[in-house]
Amino acid sequence: METVLALFARERLGVGAFGFGLLLTAEAAGGLLGAGIASFLGRRLGTGTALTCTATVEGLAILGLASAPNPYVAGLALAVCGAGMGATMVLGPSLRQAIVPAHLMGRVASTSRMLAMCAAPFGAFLGGWLATTYDLRTPLYAAAGLLLTMTGNRRVEAALRSARPQAEPAGQDPAEEIAVQTASG
């Protein structure tokens, strides 16, 4: 999605460099809001449900961006998408810290980062190819479709239950505790 965003903004929304900067600012402001409310979402919904919800919010926001009739609607869609991404960026690592044994944390974190770094050029290539072959909106629809099919709530909650020490109260979610510590510290 991000690969074609500048071209989409110029050709479909008719904005220049300043307008594109405002669109990115809206996305970043949404990201700050999402990061700020992530621990609340984790506590209120549970980490698995919160992550499923953030993926759904991101997917719907990207659909809104793809069909945006003007830069204002696009800016709102990017702000909502940024909020989903910001919350995901807090909840995801908190989940990893809760379910991965301490002696494997370095390996798992570095492998996760490597996979993300390797996926970025592939995603950029795929987005560019889809935009060139079909339309500038096609990578947006593909990204939205991918996010809207990511519903692994049961697997996340099962992993958290198995990682929870026996002495810990059943209502407490280790990932939520880590998210709260991350957000406040």
Image (spheres, grey):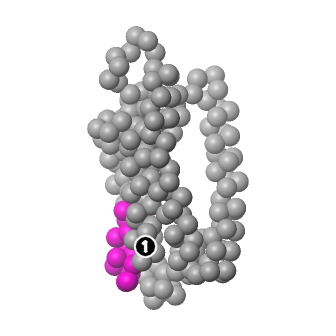
Residue 24 placed where, x, y %? Answer: 45, 70
Quick check: can you spot residue 9? Answer: yes
Magenta region: 68-82
Residue 141 placed where, x, y %? Answer: 51, 69
Secondary structure, magenta segment, majority class: helix
Left or right: 26, with 131 as reference point = left
**Image point 68% across, 33% down: which residue?**
107
**Image point 63% across, 70% down: which residue?**
127
What residue type is disc 1 on?
Leu
Which quadrant, please, contains the N terminus?
bottom right
Foreground of the two, 117 or 61: 61
Residue 80 magenta-highlighted: yes
Foreground of the two, 76 or 49: 49
Looking at the image, is 30 positioned above or below residue 137? Answer: above
Residue 77 placed where, x, y %? Answer: 38, 69
User: What residue is disc 1 on?
Assistant: 65
**Image point 46% across, 78% down: which residue?**
20
